[in-house]
Image: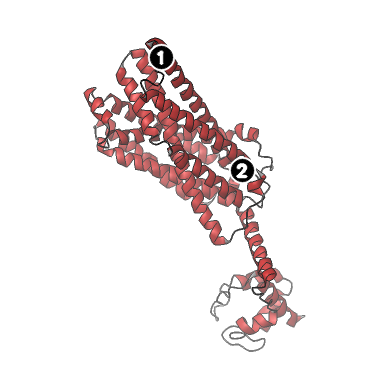
């Protein structure tokens, strides 16, 4: 996918920050919706199997309801799955363009897997909702047999594609956190057989079932669901199943999350990363409390709060992963900004907009320093003949003080930050030291 890797433009600091916001939103939408689609598919297959064993049409109706709630529109998979994936691929390609890593090929492959999964999921939904989809065939038994085979084939194929696409995607997200400590050969096999990929996928797998159950629970009691009345006739069978499913999988999440956190590479850790840990653990606790009250106290009104807590949970996970990536990718981002500044100067000079002449050390002294300093006389600040000579053998220390002023002497106020560029700091430092050779 060289078209993505070799044709990206360098970006300003503001553009990079906007791209990070796009990445956060895209990953939040992608993982939350794919979790719902994948989870409702598995739950639907579970109920479909139970309807065959129990010979009870209620479970078939429940199976049909679950998959219909998961893929509620023909275009839902494209809007909430494929589009966010493409946005994430675009952002990662830009942020990693100064490194030797290339993620576009894996993301592009995953995109096609995901498209195929959503198409097959929609076929499965149609097969459950259309009674006479194969009416052209004669004989009811043959008709139902073919329809059931089509239903199972599309469902299990979609399931396999969802598993593979999300396994690759979560692995890719973990792998790029080690962008500066691993070889650039981020082959698909390296990602598939990485321990961190398995850990991250285990967390997503459990989250998907919990979140899908909560989503279906909210949809079931939103006031417009026809199946809610049918479930009430059966004493809330569907409601109890969804609550129990969510409760089972939320119990796994804290342990899996702990393993996930300790497996994050050291170079990706930061105070922001650990700050999100507190919020994530709090959200897991609140979801558990809401589910407990729904199960023990029959307080179904907590379903909305539990679902939105789950939505916040996956959003904080996406934010935490982005903090880890930003920390690991700091050197590449710095190189990207330097490239942008160099490209900007080159472009401005090429088209003749303007060219800012470089200031000499003397120019900077007259413009920035002379109001408070002279070489012999005390003004607002001390004279240079008392301060600069000690830096004759430590030019780096002088540059550091000029760039980052701090209070050293109690008899003088702290020097204001002059906002000098690195090359201007070099010039004024050289100018000051030239007077004491």
Badge 2 crowding class, 10 Å Cα cut-off, few under 14, some 14 to 19, many 20 or more, is many
Apparent side of residue 302 relative to residue 334 in the rendered image (left or right): left
Q: Nearer the viewer, residue 165 or 352?
A: 352
Badge 1 crowding class, 10 Å Cα cut-off, few under 14, some 14 to 19, many 20 or more, is some
Residue 405: x, y in percent? 58, 72
Identify residue for label 2.
104
Quadrant location of the C terminus in the rendered image? bottom right
Q: Which of 399 and 310 is in front in this view?
A: 310
Quadrant location of the N terminus in the rendered image? top right
Residue that protrudes farthest toward the bottom in the picture: 377
Residue 62: x, y in percent? 33, 24
To which quarter of the image does residue 436 belong?
bottom right
What is the total number of numbered labels drawn onto the structure image?
A: 2
Residue 381: x, y in percent? 58, 83
Q: Which of marks 2 and 1 is in front?
A: 1
Q: Nearer the viewer, residue 275 or 290?
A: 290
* Residue beneath the point at 31% across and 18% down: 57
Identify residue for label 1.
143
Q: Is residue 130 in sight in this rendering?
A: yes
Residue 164: x, y in percent? 55, 30
38 up-or-down from 3: above or below:
above
Kindly state the secondary structure of the residue where label 1 is placed. helix
Kindly state the secondary structure of the residue where label 2 is placed. helix
Query: Disc 2, disc 1: CB below 8 Å?
Result: no
């Amino acid at each position: 996918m060289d078209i993505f890797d070799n044709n990206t433009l360098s970006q300003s600091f503001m553009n990079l920050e906007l791209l990070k916001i796009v990445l956060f939103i895209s990953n939040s939408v992608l993982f939350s919706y794919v979790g719902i689609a994948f989870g409702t598919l598995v739950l639907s297959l579970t109920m479909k199997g139970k309807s065959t064993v129990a010979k009870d049409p209620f479970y078939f109706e429940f199976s049909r309801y679950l998959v219909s709630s998961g893929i509620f529109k023909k275009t839902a998979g494209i809007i909430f799955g494929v589009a966010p994936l493409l946005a994430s691929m675009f952002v990662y390609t830009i942020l990693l363009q100064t490194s030797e890593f290339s993620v576009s090929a894996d993301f592009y492959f995953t995109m096609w897997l995901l498209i195929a999964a959503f198409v097959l999921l929609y076929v499965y939904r149609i097969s459950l909702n259309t009674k006479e989809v194969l009416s052209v065939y004669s004989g009811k038994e043959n008709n139902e047999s073919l329809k059931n085979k089509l239903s199972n084939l599309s469902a299990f194929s979609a399931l396999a594609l969802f598993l593979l696409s999300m396994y690759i995607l979560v692995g890719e997200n973990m792998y790029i956190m080690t962008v500066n400590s691993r070889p650039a050969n981020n082959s698909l096999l390296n990602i598939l057989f990485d321990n961190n990929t398995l850990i991250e996928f285990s967390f997503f797998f459990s989250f998907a079932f919990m979140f899908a159950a909560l989503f279906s629970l909210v949809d079931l009691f939103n006031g417009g669901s026809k199946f809610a009345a049918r479930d009430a006739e059966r004493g809330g069978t569907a409601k109890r199943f969804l609550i129990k499913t969510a409760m089972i999988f939320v119990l796994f999440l804290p342990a899996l999350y702990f393993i996930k956190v300790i497996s994050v590479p050291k170079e990706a850790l930061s105070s922001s990363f650990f700050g999100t840990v507190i919020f994530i653990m709090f959200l897991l606790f609140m979801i558990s409390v809401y589910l407990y009250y729904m199960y023990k106290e029959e307080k179904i009104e907590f379903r909305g709060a539990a679902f939105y807590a789950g939505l916040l949970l996956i959003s904080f996970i996406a934010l935490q992963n982005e903090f880890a990536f930003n920390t690991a990718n700091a050197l590449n981002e710095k190189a990207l900004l330097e490239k942008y500044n160099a490209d900007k100067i080159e472009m401005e000079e090429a088209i003749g907009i303007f060219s800012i002449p470089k200031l000499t050390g003397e120019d900077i002294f007259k413009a920035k320093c002379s109001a408070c300093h002279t070489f012999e006389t005390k003004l607002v600040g001390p004279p240079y003949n008392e301060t600069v000579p000690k830096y004759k053998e430590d030019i780096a220390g002088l540059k550091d003080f000029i760039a980052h002023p701090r209070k050293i002497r109690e008899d003088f106020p702290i020097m204001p930050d002059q906002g000098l560029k690195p090359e201007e700091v070099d010039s004024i430092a050289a100018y000051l030291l030239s007077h004491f050779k």
